[in-house]
């Protein structure tokens, strides 16, 4: 093992990492990137579903994080803080992309007929008793991308980023009830997409 | 494939609208009791509940499961930050 690796490993500890970052230590920065870049990239990718844009969000997020690391107070974890920056970058990109969304916002704050469960077969797998294999994981990501953006964003923030309903509402500029309805709709839609996958995967019943 | 038919299952629709909160454990106790009663008598709703809960569980596990970054992404990021 080389000296460099031994030196870097002290930054596995988040406190040490933060001290290193705030001191402007390059090794700390490199560790910071290696540890968190995949998570930030993934977050961006799930939100915008575009690899080039996800990479650009990743870069902007780290540039901003490094510039503002002195202001980081450590009230949340480093990853939470990074996610917040990345989320805002992704939202800015999506807003730039979009033609007026006002009309879309109005109509969908109730469960729609298309959200109703159709596939009523039980699933052959129990995720609680199973390590996720790569194929199921890929399937989860695919289903996520199929959700309309307004449902997907709520679902990602609430369920995957584990923000509260209130935090999600503030981040997306939505009412609490809109967040709840969209989360419900997103779950139902994803359930349907996964049901079709799991039922075609498992042995015929 | 079976269709969730609102014609003969008005109660099922009610149950469905409460299922989200039920999955999150946010439903008031009395309503929980009625819902559980219905689930024990209605196989369709039982399956929807069960698979909805599994869906949520599966996605929550993605929280700390990053995608693999395409080749070059990390390298370009380090370069952007003048770290190599
Ligand atoms: Zn029912």
Image (cartoon, grey):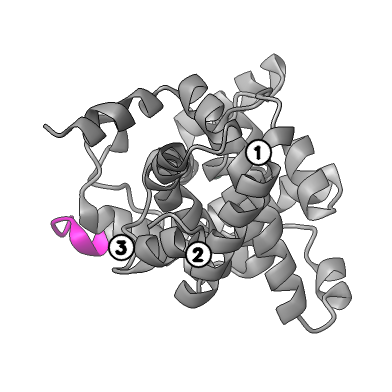
Residue B18 seen in render: yes
Left or right of A92: which side holds A129?
left
- According to the picture, the residue beneath numbered tag 3 turns out to be A197
Mark 3 against mark 1, which lies toward the viewer?
A: 1
Q: Earlier in the sequence, mark 3 or mark 1?
A: 1
In terms of image quadrants, where is residue A98? bottom right
Secondary element under disc 1, as helix, strand or loop, is: helix
Q: Are marks 2 and 1 on the same chain?
A: no
- According to the picture, the residue beneath numbered tag 1 turns out to be A69
Q: Are marks 3 and 1 on the same chain?
A: yes
| Chain letter of the residue carrying label 2 | B
The residue sitting at 20% across, 61% down in the picture is A201
Residue A187 position, x and y percent, is 55, 51
Residue A156 position, x and y percent, is 57, 51
Mark 3 against mark 2, which lies toward the viewer?
A: 2
Up-down: is A112 above or below A85? below
Up-down: is A100 above or below B74? below
Observer-nearest of A141 and B64? B64
The residue sitting at 60% across, 36% down in the picture is A80
Residue B80's tag is 2
Observer-nearest of A57 and B51? A57
Secondary element under disc 3, as helix, strand or loop, is: helix
Mark 3 burial class by Cα count in 10 Å: few <14, some 14-19, many 20+: some
Magenta part of the chain: A199-205
Observer-nearest of A21 and B31? A21
């Amino acid at each position: 093992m080389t000296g460099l690796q031994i030196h870097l490993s002290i930054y596995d500890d988040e406190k040490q990492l933060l001290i290193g970052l705030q001191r402007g230590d390059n090794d700390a920065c490199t560790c910071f990137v290696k540890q968190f870049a995949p998570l930030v990239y993934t977050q961006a990718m799930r939100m915008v579903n575009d690899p080039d844009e996800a990479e650009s969000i990743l870069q902007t997020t780290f540039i901003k994080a490094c510039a503002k690391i002195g202001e980081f107070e450590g009230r949340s974890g480093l990853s939470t803080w990074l996610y917040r920056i990345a989320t805002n970058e992704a939202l800015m990109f999506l807003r730039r992309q979009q033609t007026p969304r006002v009309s879309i916002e109005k109509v969908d704050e109730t469960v729609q007929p298309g959200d109703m469960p159709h596939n009523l077969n039980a699933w052959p797998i129990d995720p609680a008793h199973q390590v996720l294999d790569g194929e199921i994981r890929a399937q989860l990501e695919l289903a996520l991308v199929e959700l309309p953006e307004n449902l997907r964003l709520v679902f990602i923030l609430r369920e995957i980023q584990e923000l509260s309903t209130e935090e999600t509402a503030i981040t997306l500029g939505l009412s609490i009830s809109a967040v709840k309805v969209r989360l419900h709709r997103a779950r139902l839609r994803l359930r349907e997409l996964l049901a079709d996958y799991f039922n075609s995967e498992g042995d015929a019943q | 494939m079976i269709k969730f038919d609102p014609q003969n299952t008005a109660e099922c629709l009610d149950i469905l609208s409460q299922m989200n909160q039920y999955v999150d454990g946010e439903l008031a106790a009395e309503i929980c009791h009625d819902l559980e009663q219905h689930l024990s008598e209605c196989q369709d709703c039982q399956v929807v509940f069960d698979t909805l809960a599994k869906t949520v569980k599966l996605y929550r596990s993605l929280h700390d499961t990053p995608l693999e970054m395409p080749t070059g992404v990390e390298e370009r990021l380090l370069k952007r930050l003048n770290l190599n």
